[in-house]
Every structure is written in structure tokens, then in C-alpha cells.
Image (tube, rainbow, N blue to C red):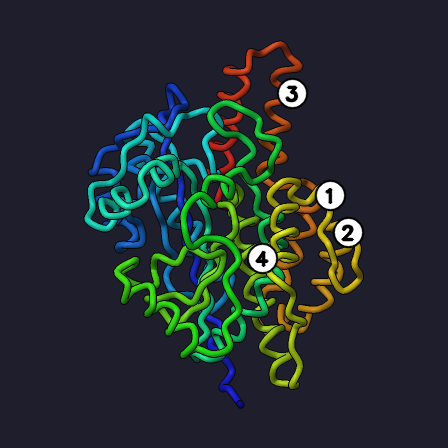
Amino acid sequence: MAYTEPLFTIGIEEEYLLVDKETRDVASDPPEALFETCQKRVEGLVTHEFLKAQIEVNTKVCETVAEARESLAAIRKTVVEVADQYGLAPIAASTHPFSHWQEQTHTEKERYDVIARDLQTVVRRLMTCGMHVHVGIDNDELRIDLLNQVSYFLPHLLAFSTSSPFWQGEDTGLKSYRLSVFDELPRTGIPNVFESWPEYRRHVDALVGAGLIEDATKLWWDVRPSDRFPTLEMRITDVCTWVDDAVAVAALYMCVLRMLYRLKKENQRWRQYASMLIEENRWRAQRYGLDEGLVDFGKGEIVPCTRLLEEIQELIHEDAEALGCTSEIGHLETIIKDGTSAHRQLAVYSVALSRGASREEALIEVVDRLIEETRKTD
């Protein structure tokens, strides 16, 4: 079947935790005026998330990655400035280094009330933040075909984004502990393979018809067809503390989708691997981030992430040029060299302890670094 080339528009969603600048603890009940002021300044691109301590931002629909960066940076800057008026600061990290979920309450909204009632403790402990990237794929059948193929690359995207090494004051030993928390929810992880859009809809309708979910927005897979927009929404990644890291990961996802579409035009496709194999790489990315490599299942061996990046850059070179994001893709090399937010958080923590700081003092220094890095949008 022939398809018209997708629009490949892009939109980025990020979630932040709001922290008290004096205590560095999560602000469990930030003032509503903060949200209202942000919404007015950026025309409704800021909203509540499940927990009161969270704030969600959404770029506008963007034609290019550069435009998405400009939009995201402007929104981050707004949230920083407005939060500062209330003695608060956002941190773009997927977990808070030491706050406890038991002290948090959810936003009073019908959707969140239903989720809290249905999922109980597994959602009450969801004090995590993520980044979602929407890419415009305006054909249902193509969206499902690309959904099946792009799953292979989800662990790679996670590895470049990790920002949640701590949980409730403990070094978890994982670069993305967020996924351990998130995976307690139902309908998460790598999605099923679907033969067609009608088959996908039949599965969704089976859940809706049985009264289990209201709609497909409650499929919380690592990647999913958006139920609200003609997009394929990537959801596996941690939120990146540096804005340039976030944009590089978003650009990588967009370029991989275009590469897969280009293969399809040439009557080729990415080899389909069983979910159990992809899950192994997902775990490696969650546990080690970029440090220990991922499995190349074509070769049957673990390959260092430096080499994997070289191979991916070769695969998507044409697509990065066509989409005008070669510099953003090039920034992935900086992430390889300097590490992700998880690496920087652990380094700050280690240095503080080596100076004789207590564990509590060291964790406060980690929060301070997160505040500082989140503020830098230029």
C-alpha cells in the first residue's frame, strides 16, 4: 500500500516536580495561582499533572525540531520565572532525590480521581516525571506499522535520557528507577504487535466494551498511537534535565520514524523481534543507561553505546538532513561523552560525600544542581 509522506510535525511534553527552594523538598501543595499565571503567559501550554506537586508543559505543534526547542525553552523559562515568585523551582528529573511519595496528594480532577480510586497505591506512589514526544503520522495504517517497528529503538531512547537514579533518599543502582515505579501500573511497557489499525481498534474496543477503560488514553505503553492527535507518541524516556538533551532525544525519535518510513517506501522494513528480546534491552537501559551497552540482536552480542550511536547516525543521516536536525542529532555525542542527568546527579552526590557531607546534605546538593540545570535554557 502506498502512503503519502507523513507531516513529521513534532510536539514535546515534559513533566516537572516543583520543589521548595528553602528545603529542597517537593512542594506538596503549590498555589493554584502559579499554574494560572503560567497558563496565561504561554497560552494554555502548561497544566496540572496527577500529583499536585507536578506541572506538565506542552510545546505547540512544531514544523521543525528547532522550533520545538524554541517553544520548549520558552515554556521552561516561564515556569522557572513564575515558580520563583512563590519560592519554588521546577526540576526536570524523573524522580526527586529524597522526597517521599506518601506525603503527596493527587490533583482534584475527575480523571485523576478515577485513576486514584481504580489503581490505589500503585498510582499514589507515582511521584515520577517523563517526557513524551509526538510525531505527526496522519495515516492510521502507517501509524500502526511504524508502532510495530519503532519498538526496537525504545531502549536506545531511554538510555540517552536517564534522570532517575535516586528514590526516597536511596541510590537505587539504576539509571532510570522511574520505570520500576511506572511499570507497576497496568497496560505499560512494550506494546503488542498489531497487523492493522482495525486489529488495534478491536483490542482497544474490547477493553472499553468490558468497562475496563474509557478510551485508549489509558494505554500507558512506551509508545502508542495518540487517542487525541494523529501522532505516534513516544513515552519511554525520562525527562531530561538539560533542554538540549531533551531536544536531541526527540530528534532521534523523529529521525528513526522517518528512516522506517523511508525503508517502507523501498519495500523494506526493520526486522521484527520478539518483545522478550526488546524487554532485555529495555532493562539494560533502565539499569545501566549508556554504561554497559545494548544487545544488537542481529549480531547476537552486546555492543557499546558509542558504537550503537555511530550505527544509528549512519542509518538516519539522510533523515536528519531532510528534517533539518543534524546539529541536534550531533548533540547525542555530547551525551555519550558527558553522561546523562543520572550520571551528573550521581557525580554530585559522590563528590559531596567524599568531602564529608552527610547523605542528606549530599542529596540537597543534587537538588541544587537539578534546579540550576533546569533553569538554563539558552
Gap in angstroms between the C-alphas marked 1 and 2: 8 Å
**Residue for badge 3:** 351
Front of the two marks 3 and 2: 2
Front of the two marks 3 and 1: 1
**Residue for badge 2:** 302
Left or right position of 25 against 111: right
Gap in angstroms between the C-alphas marked 4 and 2: 16 Å
The quadrant in which residue 216 appears is bottom left
Q: Residue at x 27, y 42 (%)?
A: 116
Disc 1 to disc 2: CB gap under 8 Å: yes
> Is residue 220 placed above or below 350 in the rendered structure?
below
The quadrant in which residue 19 appears is top left
The numbered dot on residue 154 is 4
> Is residue 233 placed above or below 109 in the rendered structure?
below
Residue flagged by tag 2: what amino acid is it? Answer: Ile
Left or right position of 100 against 362: left
**Residue for badge 1:** 292
Task: Please rate how many residues cluster around mark 1, counting C-alpha atoms within 10 Å: few if below 14, some from 14 to 19, many from 20.
Answer: some
Q: Looking at the image, is mark 4 or mark 2 earlier in the sequence?
A: 4
Gap in angstroms between the C-alphas marked 3 and 4: 32 Å
Task: Please rate how many residues cluster around mark 3, counting C-alpha atoms within 10 Å: few if below 14, some from 14 to 19, many from 20.
Answer: few
Gap in angstroms between the C-alphas marked 3 and 1: 23 Å
* Dot 3: element: helix
Badge count: 4
* Dot 1: element: loop
* Dot 4: element: helix
Residue flagged by tag 4: what amino acid is it? Answer: Leu
* Dot 2: element: strand
Query: Residue 269: percent from the left, percent from the top?
Result: 65, 77
Residue flagged by tag 1: what amino acid is it? Answer: Glu
Query: Residue 163: percent from the left, percent from the top?
Result: 54, 39
